[in-house]
Image (cartoon, rainbow, N blue to C red):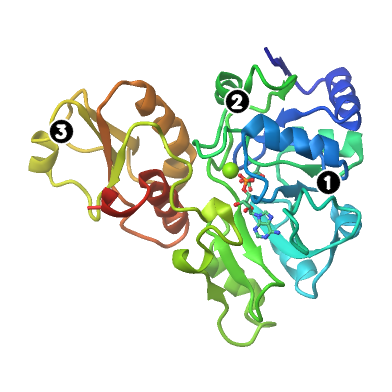
Amino acid sequence: MAEILDDSPANIERLAKALLADRLVAVPTETVYGLAGNALSAEACAAIFEAKGRPAHDPLIVHLSDLDMLGEVAVPDPLTRTLAEAFWPGPLTLILKKRPKVPSLVTSGLETVAVRIPAHQVFQKLIAAARIPLAAPSANPFGYISPTTSAHVAAQLGDRIGFILEGGPCRIGIESTILDLVTGSLPRILRPGAVSEDQIRAVLGPIQKGPFAVASPSETQGLIAPGLLDRHYSPGTPLVLRTRPFASEELMNLPTDVAALCIQKPGDARPNIFWLSEDGDPREVARRLFSMLRDLDRAGFGSIEAEPMTDEADLGRAINDRLRRAAGRGNQVR
Ligand code: TXA
Ligand code: MG
């Protein structure tokens, strides 16, 4: 079983050495826990794909400690500095042109590389100690819900990895926003996250004339960002995403083997009624979403019926995106 270690100086040193020896370490970030390995080592990166059961066509995000490290792995785009100043360290991943020293395994053969500087002090200590860029996908078996605590990682990957660095529950709870700066003629959001489209527009607006694109699911399906695959982040229990919140009588009439997943605490209480936030605060909803889906998945219900966020501003869009993917294809939405 993986050892769960705190961020004492001795542990950080030990884990940095392990990374330099091509071993894997599960790490906390502000978004979700990642499974980290030396991004410049094809061997370490192969071990990441293997541990996750991840197909080789799904590229990894490279995590950096600071902008000095950026030039090693990517060619900074003119917009990079502006975005970095506004959002790094933080939950924004940029797709940039890659440098040759990044193994093609990391980028699944693409000429681009995904990079971000994460905002978690414990992970930052480890990157700084190892002094290497770290490739880290979310630390879950491929296709399952991303982990937001060390216990989630231990439960699913504990027998396949040596170490988990403890960093407490993740503050944001859903994966970073992915912004592609190089593939098209305009910047494109490939995956919505805690950095919203409005926030990015506010920063790019003065530089970038005209609108930038937000990729539609059909455009990206299975192609550039497999995180955008139809079914992803899924619990084993079938999940239905509703088009609108539950009415009180709908909740009362729900069969007992169906779990109702509400955004906000409803007036009615039943053993099969659950909610993500007392008052519907999007930050709390995002933080608790994956943990709740895991709990419901283990609770033995026949299915889960989930409410959408009615407001897509701010985090609402990213939350609905994850719920839609948890529901999967076609008739799972009603
Ligand atoms: O918040 C996060 O981003 C977390 C933490 C650990 O940093 N990481 C994460 O990684 O969510 P992962 O591997 O689960 O999702 C990364 C996504 C994948 O959908 C992948 O296809 C996309 O990033 N990606 C990576 N490199 C890419 C590239 N060069 N072009 C387009 N998409 C890329
Ligand atoms: Mg993932």
Query: In what element is the residue under mark 1?
Result: loop
Q: Residue at x 72, y 72 (%)?
A: 182
Q: Residue at x 51, y 40 (%)?
A: 143
**Quick check: can you spot residue 274?**
yes
Query: In what element is the residue under mark 2?
Result: helix
State whether residue 255 is above or below residue 314: above
Ligand 2 lies in quarter? top right
Image quadrant of residue 84? Answer: bottom right
Q: Residue at x 82, y 35 (%)?
A: 44
Under mark 1, the amino acid is Ser
* C-alpha distance separating marks 2 and 3: 34 Å
Residue identified by numbered label 3: 268
Residue identified by numbered label 2: 153
Q: Is mark 2 within 8 Å of ligand 1?
A: no
Upstream in sequence: badge 3 or badge 1: 1
* Outermost residue, top side: 1
* C-alpha distance separating marks 3 and 1: 47 Å
* Outermost residue, bottom side: 209
Task: Assign the N terminus to one quadrant of the image.
Answer: top right
Under mark 2, the amino acid is Val
* C-alpha distance separating marks 1 and 2: 23 Å
Query: In what element is the residue under mark 3?
Result: loop
Q: Give coordinates of residue 75: x percent, y percent.
A: 85, 66
Upstream in sequence: badge 2 or badge 3: 2
Residue identified by numbered label 1: 65
Q: Give coordinates of residue 296: x percent, y percent.
A: 35, 27
